[in-house]
Amino acid sequence: VNMNHFMVSPWEFTTMLRFNLRRIFLGQKKIEKALVAYKKSFQLKKSNRALFIIVDLLRGLKKDSEAIAFLKEQLITSGDDESIHLKLASIYQQINKQDDAITHYQKLLSINPSNTVALNNLAWIFVQQDNADGLVLAKKAFEIASGNVVIVDTYGYALIKQGYYKEGLKV
């Protein structure tokens, strides 16, 4: 291939080719091949977008433990990245490992106390566990984002679970 025709450097051409191969493999439902292509690309240039695609592909292949290990490895190298903590917490919550989810939501909130997703999801876990902190967190999320129906739902449910029926129904 004459790369001068494309008016890009060989590195840019290779990057574009890899990007298109990844998309083609995904489009053809060749998940294993797409995973390999994304991992190679991620080694060359790390990004959370590629990281989360890799993790989602691993989860789609029922490889949750590998996805979690990969995220934890990236968390170590990237420092306390909010989005990686959120992704880990969400996965743990989905696979019913609530203690691990709590750890990552709390870590995320120590970095960004106003993260409404972490506030809401941690509130939900605590409400399910009959932990009164769930109402506190749900209220804080509600005060920040009262227009978000998911947050409104969690706050209303937390109020009702704590016995504040009138207030819960009002919300």
Image (cartoon, grey):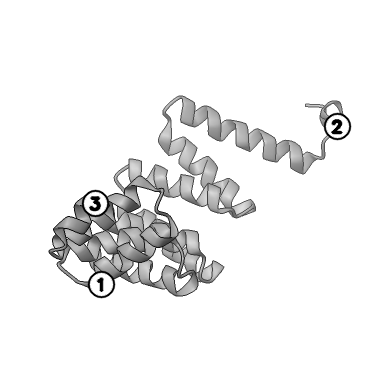
What type is the residue that disc 2 sits on?
A: Met
Residue at the disc numbered 2: 7
Residue at the disc numbered 3: 170
CA distance for labels 1 and 2? 59 Å
Disc 3, disc 1: CB below 8 Å? Answer: no
Q: Is residue 165 left or right of residue 149?
A: left
Residue drawn at the location 22% of the way across and 66% of the way down? 126
Q: Quadrant of residue 157?
A: bottom left
Tell me which numbered mark, 3 or 1, is placed earlier along the sequence.
Answer: 1
Residue at the disc numbered 1: 133
Residue drawn at the location 75% of the way across and 40% of the way down? 12
Place of residue 8 in the rendered image (x, y in percent of width and height, measured from the top left): 82, 36
Q: Is residue 167 left or right of residue 71?
A: left
Let me know if residue 85 appears in the view: yes
Number of numbered discs on residues: 3
Question: With respect to residue 5, does 112 lie above or below?
Answer: below
CA distance for labels 3 and 1? 21 Å
Place of residue 139 in the rendered image (x, y in percent of width and height, measured from the top left): 32, 64
What type is the residue that disc 1 sits on?
A: Asp
Tell me which numbered mark, 1 or 2, is placed earlier along the sequence.
Answer: 2
